[in-house]
Amino acid sequence: MFNNFRLSMAWLHTWFGLVMGFVLMVVFFFGALSVFDREIDRWAIPQTRFEPQPMPSFDRMLRPIFESMQPDAANVEQARSRVNGPMAKEFPVKSWGAYTTHRDPVLGIFAGFELPNAKDPEDTVWGLRTVDPRNGQTLPDDHLKIGSQFFYPLHYSLNLNWMNFGIWIVGFAALIMLVALVSGVVMHRKIFRELFTFRPKKHTQRSALDLHNLTGVVALPFHFIFAFSGLVIFGATYYFPVTHTQLHPLHELHEKHEAEETGLPHERAGVAGPLASVDAMVAEAQRRWAEAGKAGDVGFLNVQHVGDANSYVSIYRAGTDRIALVGDGIHFKGATGEVLRVDPPLTAVASVNTFLTGLHLQHFRHWLLRWLYVLGGLSGCVCIATGFIFFVEKRKRQHARQGASGARWVDGFAVATVTGMVVAALAMLIANRLLPEQMPAGWAGKGDWERYAFWGAWVLAFLHGLWRTAPVAQARMAPAWREQCWAIAVLAVAAVLLNWVTTGDHLLRTIGAGYWPVAGLDLAILASAAIAVLAACRLKRRTDAAPLADAAQDPGHQGATGRHPETARA
C-alpha cells in the first residue's frame, strides 16, 4: 500500500489525527481551563468571592449541618428504578464527608443514605450541601459551578453521561493521540530542526505546518504524559472495571479480608454507638503529620457507619506540598477516638500510580507549574488547529478541480471546533452574568439556562462555520475563521464589562485588592480578545493577498523556470 514505513506512518498520523482531532481539541481546551476551575467558579458565583478557608470545626459547625441533611429530591427520584416496590419515606444515614482544596473558598459536604429495598444492597442515595466555612451558612446549590461542574467534566467526558459514553470517546481519543504522537515522530526525520523553524510570513500552508510541528515538538512530553496518565486514571474504573463486574464476588471477599487486616469495619454492627470529638481526632492527625515533616491541612474527612458502634473516622491530608496524590490517611474509632490505622507507605507500583494521578489532576500548590499546564494544553490546541488548517490548505485546490467538497467540510468542522467552542464558553459566561439569581417559578434553574446558552452558541457557531466555509469549495479562504474571531473579541469584552456592571468587581478593584482569581480570569478573557483581534486582522490580510497568490500558482505565472514555486523551492 505504501512505498515505505515512513509513508505509512504519515497516513496514520494524518487520518487518525483528523478523525479524533475534533475530540482532542475539546479535551485540550477545557483541560487547560480546568487548571483554574475553582477560580472560574468564583467568577461565576460572586457570593463565593472570598479567600480559601481551612476545614472548619466538625464538632461546632459541620456536625449539626450533617445531622440536618436528607437525600436530595433529584437523587431520590433517579433511584426509583433501582428499588423493588415503592420508594421508602425514610433513609438511614450511612456516611458523612467533607472535601476542600487550597483553592476552595466554600466547602462541599455530602451525606450518604441507605436505599431501602434496593436491588443492590450497597446502593446509596446522596445529599449535598455547599457551606460557607466562615459561618456555616448554607449557600444555594442551584448555582452552577461553571469551572468545576461543567468545564472540568467536559474535559474528560464531553458531558455525555449516558453509559459513560463520553468517557469512552475521550479514552479512545487519548489512545489515538498516543498513536499520532509516535507516528508523528517517525514521519518527521528532522524533528529537532523543526523545533526552531517557524516562518509566519510564508503562505498559509507552510506557516500552518511549521506551527504544527513546532507546538507538537515543544510540548511532546506534556502531550504524551497527559494522554497516558489520563488512560491510567480511568483504566481500572471505566475501561477495565473487572473488580466491579467479572470479579465482583472476589472483590467483595477482598474488601472483607482487607477490613479484617486493617481493623476498619466493613459492615455495621447494628448497635447504636456515639461519636467522639472529631476535632480531637483532627488535632491528633495534624500532630502526626507534623512529626513526619508534612503540612497539616485537612483535605478530606469521612465518617463511615454513622451512629453505629462500628463507626470510624478517616482523615486525609490535603497533600498540596507534593505532586503525588497521597492522602496520608489516619483512621480513628468513632466511639472513642483511638487510632485504628495509619496508612502505610505505598508500594512501588502504587507510588507510580499516585504520581501519575497527581501529575494529571494537579492538586499541588505551585502556581508557575499550573500556568505551564495551561500553556501545554493551549499548545495542544494550536497543534491540532494548525493540523486542520494544513489538511485543508493542502487539498482544497485539488478538491476544487475535482468538484469534491471534502476540504470544505473539514474546514467547517474545524471552525466550529476551534473558534466555536471559545464562542460557546464566552456565551456561557455572559449568560451567567445576565441571568437573574433566581429564575421565575416554573422555569428551569439558572444553571440549566447557562448550559442551554453554551450548547446553543456552539450549535450556532457550527452552522455558521458550515455556511461561511463555502468558498473553500472554490479553493478560496473561508471568511468563517475571521468572523468568529471578531465574535470572540466582542463576547470577551462583553463578559468582562458585565462582570464589572453586575458585581462592581472591575479590574482596578480586583488587582488593587490582590484578588487574582477574578482579576486573573478577566485578564485572560481580555487576552483572548486581543489574540482574536490580531488573528482576525492577519486573516484579513491573507484574504486580500490570496488572489495574488492564486495568480502566482497559475501555469501562466510560473516564471522563467516553468516550474511551480513549491517545486522550484524543493
Image: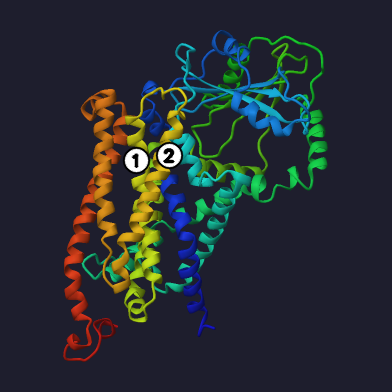
Looking at the image, which residue is at 22% across and 47% down?
530
Residue type, numbered disc 1: Ala
- Count the numbered circles shown: 2
Instruction: Relative to 87, say whether 200 is above or below.
Output: below
- Residue 548 x/y as whole percent: 16, 75
Query: Which residue is under mark 1?
Result: 427
Depth order, front residue of 493/559:
493
Query: Which residue is under mark 2?
Result: 452
Left or right placement of residue 269 versus residue 19 in this view: right
Residue 204, located in which quarter of the rendered image? Answer: bottom left
Q: What is the quadrant of the N terminus in the image?
A: bottom right
Instruction: Relative to 16, say whether 100 is above or below.
Output: above
Say the numbered circle drawn on residue 517: none
Depth order, front residue of 155/570:
155
Left or right placement of residue 335 versus residue 551 in this view: right
Q: Is residue 544 visible?
A: yes
